[in-house]
């Protein structure tokens, strides 16, 4: 993995939802490498505790796991409270937890729709709320990055509830950034494109009948010759969390190699 600089987040406390695997784990690792104390949330206690212990051992930074379902508001609020109790503050939040279950306009059930909204919008809303309350109470600046999706531009027909929820997260990002700019709390988002993760491998096999060579074919089908890489995204997230990114707030950046709206 690359490293942006020494200790871009030195002395900061970073809370990463969905931080025990995939992009979330990469973000947690990058934050710790750059000097942050890290709290991660996830559903599986065994996986989370093992990851946090490994992260602390490899980085030399404090790290701990809080079991929380991103769609459970009480659990999300409890995770923020536990982080504050452990570290005394929350300086940065990264909302990585997300749901990508397939559904079209014709076959999406109310239950599936509500699940997407709960995990992809409601959970981030209330995690941000808890962190911002802490920042405001301490009269200290902070930084939040929401992991969104290129699909928020419109997406595929089989991602109807996902697209709806991620588009909502864009609105939330901008609204909160505007509301708290005078509190010196910077809030930005990344629209992530097609990315290589274990979760994407499982998704391709489950929903699209992918074979063992799917990644090789996928890499050959995109301009840069590779899908997005979680370590590269994680370094960019650390940059946005850090003071190195300056005054930028309310921005939702397309982190992808495709250009929406452009045509040959």
Image (tube, rainbow, N blue to C red):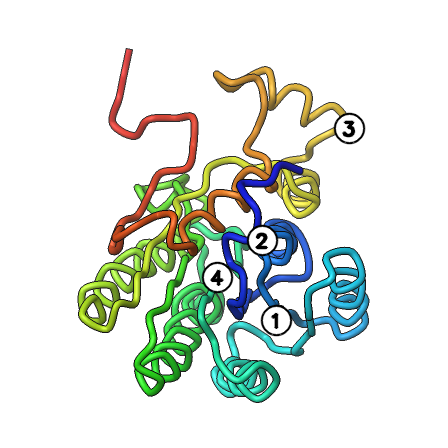
Q: Quadrant of the N terminus?
A: top right
> In which quadrant of the rendered view does residue 19 lie?
bottom right
Q: Quadrant of the C terminus?
A: top left
Q: Kindly tell me whether residue 33 is visible in this rendering.
A: yes
Give the residue displayed 69% in from the left and 70% down from the top. Answer: 62
Give the residue displayed 67% in from the left and 72% down from the top. Answer: 43
Height in image: 34 above or below 75? above
Query: Mark 1 highlights which residue?
Result: 39
Whole-Å distance between the Cαs marked 1 and 3?
Answer: 34 Å
Which element carries disc 2, helix, strand or loop? loop
Query: Mark 2 highlights which residue?
Result: 34
Q: Which mark, residue 160? A: none
N-terminal of the pair, mark 2 or mark 4, is 2
Whole-Å distance between the Cαs marked 2 and 4?
Answer: 15 Å
- The residue lying toward the viewer, choosing from 121 and 51, is 51
The location of residue 258, given as percent across then percent down, is 39, 26
Q: Is residue 231 toward the left or the right of residue 179 in the image?
A: right
N-terminal of the pair, mark 1 or mark 4, is 1
Which element carries disc 4, helix, strand or loop? strand
Whole-Å distance between the Cαs marked 4 and 3?
Answer: 32 Å
Q: Kindly tell me whether residue 106 is visible in this rendering.
A: no
Whole-Å distance between the Cαs marked 1 and 2?
Answer: 14 Å
Q: Which mark, residue 94? A: 4
Which element carries disc 3, helix, strand or loop? loop
Query: Mark 3 highlights which residue?
Result: 212
């Amino acid at each position: 993995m690359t490293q942006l600089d020494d200790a871009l987040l030195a002395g900061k406390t970073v809370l990463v939802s969905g931080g025990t695997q995939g992009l979330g784990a990469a973000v947690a690792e990058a934050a710790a490498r750059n000097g942050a104390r890290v709290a991660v949330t996830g559903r599986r206690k065994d996986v989370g505790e093992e990851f946090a212990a490994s992260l602390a051992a490899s980085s030399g930074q404090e790290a701990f796991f809080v079991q929380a379902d991103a769609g459970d508001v009480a659990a999300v609020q409890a995770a923020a409270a536990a982080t504050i109790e452990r570290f005394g503050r929350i300086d940065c939040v990264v909302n990585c937890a997300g749901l990508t279950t397939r559904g079209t306009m014709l076959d999406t059930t109310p239950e599936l729709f509500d699940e997407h909204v709960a995990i992809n919008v409601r959970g981030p809303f209330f995690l941000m709320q808890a962190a911002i309350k802490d920042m405001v109470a301490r009269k200290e600046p902070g930084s939040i990055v929401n992991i969104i999706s290129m699909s928020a531009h419109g997406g595929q027909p089989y991602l109807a509830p996902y697209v709806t929820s991620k588009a909502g997260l864009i609105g939330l990002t901008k609204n909160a950034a505007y509301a708290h700019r005078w509190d010196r709390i910077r809030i930005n988002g990344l629209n992530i494109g097609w990315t290589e993760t274990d979760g994407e491998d499982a998704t391709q096999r489950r929903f699209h009948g992918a074979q063992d060579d799917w990644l090789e074919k996928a890499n050959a089908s995109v301009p840069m010759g590779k899908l997005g890489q979680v370590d590269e995204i994680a370094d960019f997230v650390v940059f946005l969390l850090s003071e190195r990114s300056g005054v930028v707030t309310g921005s939702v950046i397309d982190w992808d190699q495709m250009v929406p709206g452009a045509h040959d």
